[in-house]
Every structure is written in structure tokens, then in C-alpha cells.
Image (cartoon, grey):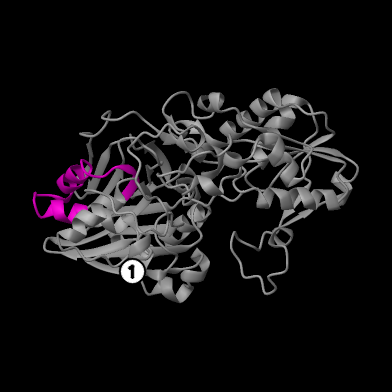
Amino acid sequence: MSIHEECGVFGVYSEKSRNLSGLCYYGLYALQHRGQESCGIVVNDDGLFVSHKDVGLVNEVFSEAVLSSFPEGNMALAHVRYGTTGAASRRNCQPIEVNHQKGRMAIAHNGNLSNAAALRTELELSGAIFHTTSDTETIAYIVTRERLRCGSIEDAVIRAMDILEGAYSLILMSSQKLILVRDPHGFRPLCFGRTPDGCIVAASESCVLSAVGVEFVRDLEPGEVLIISADGIESRKEHCHRAPKRLCVFEYIYFARPDSVIDGVSVHSARIRAGEILALSHPAEADIVIGVPDSGLDAALGYSRASGLPYEIGLIKNKYIGRTFIAPDHRLDQVKIKLSAIPSVVQGKRIVLVDDSIVRGTTSGRIVGLLREAGAKEIHMRISAPPFLYPCYYGTDIDSSENLIAVRHSTEEIAEMIGADSLGYFPADRLSELAGGAGYCSACFEGNYPTAVPGDSRKDRFERKLSERVVEKC
């Protein structure tokens, strides 16, 4: 699996001042699967924002000393990042903080704007100076501009939603309000819950609420804006039902944790179903089924149940290595450091190997090689997603079709390239069975984009030389 994680957002509102940095820390830990590039926390201490952000994993960025340096407060905002726009640097860490005429604001964003480049150009021509290369700063500028034109920050957010296009699940924090926003298509998840003593906690996934002892209340509706303040909770739905729902189906296939429930659909159940459909659409004469940790395990279990083949643990993941680590000797195969095969399980066996996707084919080929070295007799690769054929403009790190192996090669050719005896993908026409029916985005598989697409979707488009940029009309 070579697709990178989405970002994760976390926010909390308390009627009374308390230590919120610890709650944010554990919330970010539960969100770590959605981003391992950088993280940050901002605590609101009666209008004074105190923050710490840096590149690295949650436990690397937030030591005990750093956490103890935060004051008590009644609101806090936190974020883990994998950047689909902008380089991996401290300047792009979130939450982004803004000081303006009407006060302070912090913003955390999960998703990707499809019209970010056009908006950024418009803002720069009007005098805006950008300090980051993240499209989140563009959102902050738009909201701030609209705030100066209207009364309240929630009105500014509503007006900004008329301008923003693409995927954005946001949590904004002003001096007195915590605001939750889900874009009209609902590309990315966002939910909230309540503690027994009245705290309101919001997060990208329901599993995070469970992890920090918060009772789940509900998901935000696509287009909904939720304002949390001393006056209680207000829901604004001006943008609801303005656009068809298009939750990213890859949330169910890979992004979300299996113990999450998104828009009423269990992620674990969706992945089990994906494996069952794979078994029916691409059966194989084999002895055992194994999954690639961790993203292929649930689908492998589903394949086993539907096919009647025994489910086995044939690959072990090194628990102490994240998705990124420093290899002192670049000649070492990093896949072998992360994964190892169990010879006693796979030797002499015909294996169905289940993973969630193939992007470039490099990692899949190395995993197949591991099993061959351990003595596997046959390897039948099964993928719980359709082939990636199109770039994504809504937050998945697929910025060009030229690097997608399925664009240039047939299924049979890919099987030969990765060393598998056969290869089968999840059928695209059955994706609705994973997402609970209609209302999902499958543009990266089928090219059916819900919004206009940008001329330049490259992750580093704001860091490229002028001669290499694609300038979009406003």
C-alpha cells in the first residue's frame, strides 16, 4: 500500500477552564493513522492562544514538558497532518493561527480544495501574503476576509462556503466559539460527542471519541456548520442538500480505522464485505488466505469467510516502525524491515494475498517477493479496491495518472510485474455496497469528478519554479 494518509482534526469545548492539552494529546494519538508528518495543538486561554506545532509523530512533538507548558483553557484545537498540498515543513503544520481586526482564529483542515490555486492567485493579486504552501491558509484568508464584511464568524464561514470548492472538514476556533464545518459534498468525515460533564468533543472519526471516553452524538451532515459556544450548540444548514453527497469511498477501504463508524456505516463491516465480494468475483484455487498488515487484514478475513479457505497470519508487521523511518543503509529493503513472512505458515502453500490497493506496484512486488523467499508455492493477489486510474483532487495523495501502474498496464501485465500468479481487483460497480448505498466519491477509480478539476494538482505546485507553474484563471 503506497497511498498516504489523510489529515485528522480534533477539537474540544468546555464550559469551564480545564487542562485540555492532555485530552488533545490522546485524541491525536488515536488519529495518528490519518497523518504521521506533523501535528499541533492550540489551547484557548480566555482569548489568549497558546500553541505548539512541529514535524514528527505525536509522541515526538509533545513531550511531558511541552504538554505541561500549556495553560488551562475552555477550548482547544488539534491536528495531525499528511500534506496533500504543500511540503513537509514546520511552516505547514496545523492548526493555522490568524490574528486580525476582529480577534484571533485557529483552523484545522482535513481535505483538499479543488480551486485552491485559483483562490490563492486571486488573494495574492489583492495583496495577500502567504506564509505557508498549504491550501488551509487559503481557507483562513477567505474566512477572515468575509469576517470583516459581516457580523459573526459563523456568518463568515457560511459566506466562505459559497467560494470554497472541494473537500474540507474543518474545525475553527475563535476567542469564544468552536465551529465545525463539513463541505456540501461531505467528502471527509467529521463527528462530535459529549462527555458526562458536558464537554463537546469533535473529531474526524468516531473511534477517537471512544478512545478518549466521549459518547458519540452524531456525524455532521454534508454542508452543515455547527457553532459551539456559551449559548449552547447551534446548527446552520444553509449549505445542506445543495450538492449530492460524495463521501470518499476510500475512507471505508483504507483511510479510517476499522473501529470507526462513518455516516452510519461500520468501517470494519465494509472491509469484511469487500473481501467477500472479492472472493465471489475473483476466486482462486488456494490453501490459505492472508492479509497485508494492517490495511488488508479485514478484507482477507472476509475473503476467507466467503471462500471457505482458512485465514492465516502469514505476514508480521514490526510494531516499532511507523510508515516513515530513517534507514541507515539505503541498500536495505525497507519492506523487509517493516514486514516479515512466517515460513511455517506459507511454505509450500498456495496463497491468496489480500491488500487494499496497488499504486505503483513497487511495494506489492516486494511483499510477493517476501512470500516467495519464505517458500510460498503460488501467490494470488487480491485487491479490495478497484484500480487507480485517475488523480484525486480531494485529499488522497494521487496527483498524476502517469505514476499509476494500472493506467499503463493490464491486470495480467501487473501480475507478472509484481511476481504474482494472478491478480484480481474489487469491481468498481459494487463500491456502493461498501458505502451503504449511494452518495460516495469514486473519482480516483472511475473519473466521475463531483467538482471542476484544477489545471495543476501537484502537491508541490506552490513551491515550484515560476516557469513550471500552471497559472489558473480566477
Q: Is residue 389 left or right of residue 462?
A: right
Q: Which residues are magenta?
A: 142-170
Q: Position of residue 194 (x, y in %)?
A: 36, 44
Looking at the image, which is closer to me, 224 or 70? 224
Q: In the picture, residue 297 is in which quadrant?
A: top right
Q: Position of residue 220 (x, y in %)?
A: 34, 37
Q: Is residue 318 left or right of residue 94?
A: right
Which residue occupies 37% across, 43% down?
192
Q: In the picture, residue 311 is in which quadrant?
A: top right
Q: Position of residue 122 (x, y in %)?
A: 20, 54
Q: Is residue 73 among what the camera can see?
A: no
Looking at the image, which is closer to me, 403 or 93? 403
State the residue position of label 1: 51
Q: Is residue 63 among what the camera can see?
A: yes
Q: Does 465 appear in magenta?
A: no
Q: Position of residue 179 (x, y in %)?
A: 26, 48
Looking at the image, which is closer to me, 409 or 92? 409
Mark 1, secondary structure of its residue? strand
Question: In the rendered structure, which amino acid carries the disc numbered 1?
Answer: Ser
**Mark 1 surroundings: few (<14), some (14-19) or many (≥20) residues within 10 A:** many
